[in-house]
Image: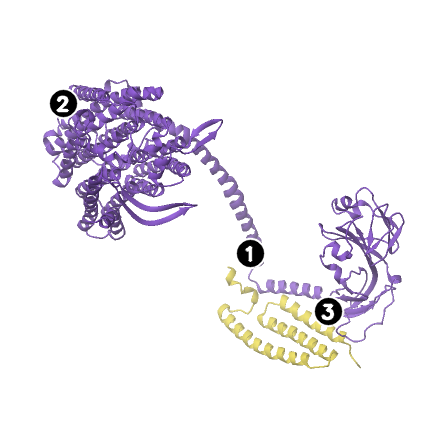
Chain colours: A yellow, B purple
């Protein structure tokens, strides 16, 4: 069975939408980080799908690897921030992180 | 000493006080007080010695073969058009006399100040100002040209301002300084304007050149009358002189100027600066002699000032105010002398007045020092100081008698000369100018009365201070006044001696004794030449002057024997108040000048408050504050808000970029047409280049670059219509898209403005559209299509890609219109189908080339 580009694009859109919606509505720092990962992976799917549609080179796949690597690094920093934030506020709820405006 | 050394010495006469001012002004603040005072006094004293040296040389040359002058070229300042302005010092007999008494009296007053100002904190500042004043005054009298003179003129004005307001912590003193400065600006306007008029008339800024060539200068035609340039220039110069020398109506600043320290009043506001106006008149005597009108104006102004000053001085109770009004009055005498053409007499009075008035002021200073008065000394509260202050008493008395005009003191001789000048003008000018003669007699009378008043008010002041018993102790002055120390009294004695002897330099001609001053100034200052010269005026003057002095002095002597009421109190209160307020001139200024200015200022302030402060400041401020309150809500610090904003923005971007873009442009080069639409990621295109609603090549199967651009060829049968491009030389191109239906073109279609109408004229061709063609019937007007001339009375056809030329600068280009279909599908399956009507304009036509160049080479109109 050959899947069309549209299928991949649809999957990527749905994944991205779930990630974005989760990021917007959830308040837990950790869940938001997971949603972030979800959005990044949606982009990865789309990149690979583009590569499949235009297989002359492997730009899309290579780019997807970069995204995965950068996402790992970003997550490391993000978790560090979560720990620091928890030490400071005794909570991981991000809507409490508004000290600068108060 | 050779000539060069004299020239250098003359330069140093000016430079020494200037150097003193710079050293003390810049470095003196924390320096040793003795050193500062030594530098200041020493530089002026040295300057006096040098000027004595130079003056002896110059005065020795009088009557010799060569011109009696020392000239020092300093440097070329600038040139105005073809007129050079050089900084050049000239010491001729006139400036020698001025330089001598300026430096001499300045030296004495510096010495006096060493004692008088000994408790002053701003010691160096005071001496720097005094030195700067001396330098400026020397620049004024040594200048060879009007602009350089003007620099000195302004320099003394600035120093006067600075010194009047020397104790500027006190508001009233600062106000007095400002008043002096502003009133002087009015006069300075006159001087600058007069300077320009004279430079125009004489084609030179040099004083000597102006003096000699002004008489032959052209006349001004204004309102059908001839006005001599000398008259205009002279009146303007007098305006300048009357500001600086406190003449009517600009004298109001001088009484207030007494706010300055007393030595300053003596030096600047009695002896030197205020006589600069008289000096100017003497220096430019040629200008004033060239116009009797100006002389008469000056004579009346001077005489009136003399009388008003004397009457005001009569009722004053503050010692310095008495002396100030006395100075105004005496300056009036000097100007009256100038006005009757007796310039030498005026200058003579400048010199003698400098001695006795400086002595009086310094005497006043000494008295105030002795009774510990600060700023003002009310003569009603003094008295009985004759025994307590013997040296001050003696010198003051000598000066009082000198100013009253008692022989053989200085004032007698100079006043005598002035009265003689007025009498001579009255007696002998009648043959040529009867009005001038009348003026002479009026001046003589007014000055006679003023002289009586002068003797009276001065002796009144003397008697109230020195006779009777001392009343100062119960009025806030010192308990037991002590005679001042020698540093104060020695200058007094020197000046008093001067007041005794300086009169002998100008003995009347009638006495057949040498008149040294008159002889020295013979070649420099020219008095009015009268048809006759006898001794009669001198005898009249002697009679009037002596009588006035004796009457005035005797009356005051009787009226003020000792303690007792002030006899001027017998004057009605209103008259006395009027005199006290110096004839209400100040009130007049307040009403005529200050009030309108205040009204204008309040009006401006209202505009400032409403327009600037409210509309331009408050309104934007509130708008900004409101906007900030709105926008600050967006920054709530909650991550989710920001994330939502990002999500919305992202969605908008996605929407924008995924919507198919289909605009089509056509590039035409000859027959080849390139159609182009915007590229998009993942787009697929289908072209329908001939507009038949069927695709040309079917759908592209794969995403491929380049299909957003396609080549097409069109035949006339493909044209879906035409578009007219109206191109003129004067207006931007204008296009008319026409439908398929036949239509006659109206004027509005073809004419940007009135251009084509004017080009086509009355024989208006008929132009209309049928199908893909433009039809034209020229109606007798020669029209062209390309290079082809159309038949005049026949209908012709202009096809697509041709142009119809109308006149020289207007043409109608017929562009074919084709219909193009385009279908675009995005990567997300969104599909858009649009149809475009595109006018095919050759690339060569897009330029702004002039109509004639596009149309072809044929020239000319039928």
Q: Quadrant of residue B506?
A: top left
Residue under label 3, please give it. B680
In the image, residue B746 lies at what x, y percent?
82, 46
Which numbered disc covers residue B632? 1
* Residue at mark 1 to residue at mark 3: CA–CA distance: 38 Å
Mark 1 or mark 2: which comes first in sequence? 2
Name the mark nearer the viewer: 1 or 2: 2
Judging from the image, what secondary structure is the residue with disc 2 in? loop
- Is B567 on the left or on the right of B648, as rendered? left
Q: Residue at x 24, y 51 (%)?
A: B28
B566 and B99: which is toward the camera:
B99
Marks 1 and 2 in Cβ contact (< 8 Å): no
Q: Which one is in front in this view, the residue at disc 1 or the one at disc 3?
A: 3
Q: Nearer the viewer, residue B634 or B110?
A: B110
Which of labels 2 and 3 is toward the front? 2
Label 1 in the same subunit as label 3: yes
Depth check: give the residue in front, B364 or B832.
B364
Q: Which mark is residue B562?
A: 2
Local secondary structure at mark 3: loop
Quadrant of residue B202 within the rendered picture: top left
Residue B838 quadrant: bottom right
């Amino acid at each position: 069975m050959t899947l069309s580009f549209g299928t991949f694009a649809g999957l990527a859109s749905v994944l991205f939408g779930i990630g974005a919606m989760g990021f917007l509505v959830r308040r837990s720092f950790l869940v938001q980080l997971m949603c972030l990962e979800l959005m990044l992976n949606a982009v990865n799917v789309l990149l690979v799908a583009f590569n499949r549609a235009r297989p002359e080179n492997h730009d899309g796949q290579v780019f997807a690897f970069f995204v995965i690597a950068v996402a790992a690094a970003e997550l490391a920093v993000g978790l560090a921030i979560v720990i620091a934030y928890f030490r400071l506020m005794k909570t991981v709820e991000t809507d409490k992180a508004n000290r600068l405006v108060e | 000493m050779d000539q060069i050394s004299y020239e250098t010495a003359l330069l140093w006469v000016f430079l020494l006080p200037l150097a003193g001012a710079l050293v003390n002004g810049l470095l003196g603040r924390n320096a040793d007080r003795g050193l500062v005072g030594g530098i200041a006094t020493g530089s002026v004293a040295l300057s006096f010695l040098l000027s004595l040296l130079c003056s002896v040389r110059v005065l020795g040359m009088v009557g010799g073969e060569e011109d009696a002058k020392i000239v020092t070229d300093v440097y070329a300042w600038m040139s105005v058009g073809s007129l050079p302005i050089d900084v050049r010092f000239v010491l001729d007999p006139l400036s020698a006399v001025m330089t001598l008494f300026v430096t001499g009296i300045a030296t004495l007053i510096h010495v006096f100040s060493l004692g008088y100002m000994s408790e002053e904190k701003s010691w160096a500042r005071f001496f720097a100002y005094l030195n700067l004043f001396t330098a400026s005054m020397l620049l004024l009298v040594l200048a060879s040209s009007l602009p350089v003179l003007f620099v000195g003129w302004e320099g003394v004005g600035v120093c006067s301002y600075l010194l009047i307001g020397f104790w500027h912590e006190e508001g009233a003193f600062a106000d007095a300084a400002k008043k002096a400065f502003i009133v002087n600006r009015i006069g300075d306007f006159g001087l600058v304007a007069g300077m320009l008029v004279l430079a125009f008339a004489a084609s030179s800024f040099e004083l000597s050149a102006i003096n000699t060539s002004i008489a032959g200068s052209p006349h001004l035609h204004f309102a059908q009358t001839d006005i001599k340039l000398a008259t205009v220039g002279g009146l303007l110069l007098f305006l300048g002189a009357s500001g600086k020398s406190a003449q009517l109506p600009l004298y109001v600043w001088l009484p207030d100027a007494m706010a300055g320290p007393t030595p300053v009043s003596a030096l600047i506001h009695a002896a030197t600066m205020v006589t600069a106006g008289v000096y100017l008149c003497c220096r430019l005597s040629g200008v004033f002699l060239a116009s009797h009108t100006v002389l008469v104006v000056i004579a009346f102004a001077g005489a009136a000032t003399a009388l008003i000053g004397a009457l005001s001085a009569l009722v004053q109770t503050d010692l310095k105010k008495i002396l100030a009004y006395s100075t105004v009055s005496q300056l009036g005498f000097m100007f009256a002398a100038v006005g009757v053409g007796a310039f030498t007499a005026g200058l003579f009075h400048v010199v003698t007045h400098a001695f006795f008035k400086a002595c009086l002021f310094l005497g006043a200073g000494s008295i105030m020092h002795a009774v510990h008065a600060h700023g003002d000394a009310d003569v009603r509260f003094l008295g009985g100081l004759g025994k307590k202050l013997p040296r001050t008493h003696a010198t003051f008395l000598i000066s009082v008698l000198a100013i009253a005009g008692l022989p053989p003191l200085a004032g007698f001789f100079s006043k005598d000369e002035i009265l003689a000048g007025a009498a001579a003008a009255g007696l002998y000018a009648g043959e040529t100018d009867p009005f001038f003669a009348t003026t002479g007699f009026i001046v003589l009378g007014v000055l006679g009365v003023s002289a009586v008043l002068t003797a009276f008010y001065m002796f009144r002041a003397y008697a109230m201070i020195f006779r009777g018993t001392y009343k100062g102790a119960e009025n806030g002055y010192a308990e037991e006044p002590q005679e001042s120390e020698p540093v104060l009294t020695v200058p007094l004695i020197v000046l008093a001696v001067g007041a005794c002897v300086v009169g002998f330099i100008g003995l009347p001609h009638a006495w057949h004794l040498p008149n040294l001053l008159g002889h020295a100034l013979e070649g420099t200052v020219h008095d009015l030449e009268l048809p006759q010269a006898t001794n009669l005026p001198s005898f009249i003057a002697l009679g009037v002057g002596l009588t006035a002095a004796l009457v005035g002095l005797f009356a005051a002597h009787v009226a003020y024997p000792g303690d007792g009421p002030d006899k001027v109190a017998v004057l009605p209160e209103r008259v006395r108040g009027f005199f006290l307020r110096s004839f209400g001139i100040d009130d007049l200024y307040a009403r005529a000048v200050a009030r309108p200015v205040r009204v204008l200022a309040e009006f401006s302030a209202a505009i400032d408050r409403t327009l600037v402060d409210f509309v331009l400041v408050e309104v934007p401020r509130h708008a900004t504050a409101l906007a900030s309150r709105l926008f600050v809500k967006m920054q709530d610090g909650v991550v989710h808000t920001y994330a939502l904003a990002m999500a919305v923005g992202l969605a908008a971007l996605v929407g924008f970029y995924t919507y198919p873009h289909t605009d089509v442009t056509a590039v035409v080069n000859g027959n080849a047409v390139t159609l182009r639409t915007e590229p998009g990621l993942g787009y697929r295109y289908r072209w329908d280049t001939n507009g038949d609603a069927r695709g040309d090549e079917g759908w592209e199967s794969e995403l491929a670059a380049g299909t957003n651009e396609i080549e097409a060829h069109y035949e006339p049968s493909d044209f879906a219509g035409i578009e007219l491009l109206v191109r003129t030389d004067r207006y931007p191109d204008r296009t008319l898209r026409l439908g398929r239906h036949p239509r006659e073109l109206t004027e509005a279609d073809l004419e940007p403005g009135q251009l084509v109408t004017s080009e086509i004229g009355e024989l208006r061709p008929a132009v209309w559209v049928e199908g893909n063609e433009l039809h034209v019937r020229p109606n007798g007007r020669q029209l062209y299509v390309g290079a082809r001339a159309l038949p005049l009375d026949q209908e012709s056809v202009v096809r697509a890609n041709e142009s119809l030329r109308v006149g020289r600068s207007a043409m109608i280009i017929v562009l074919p219109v084709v219909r193009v279909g385009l279908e675009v599908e995005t990567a997300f399956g969104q599909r858009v189908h649009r149809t475009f009507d595109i006018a095919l304009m050759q690339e060569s036509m897009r330029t702004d080339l002039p109509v004639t160049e596009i149309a072809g080479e044929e020239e000319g109109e039928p």
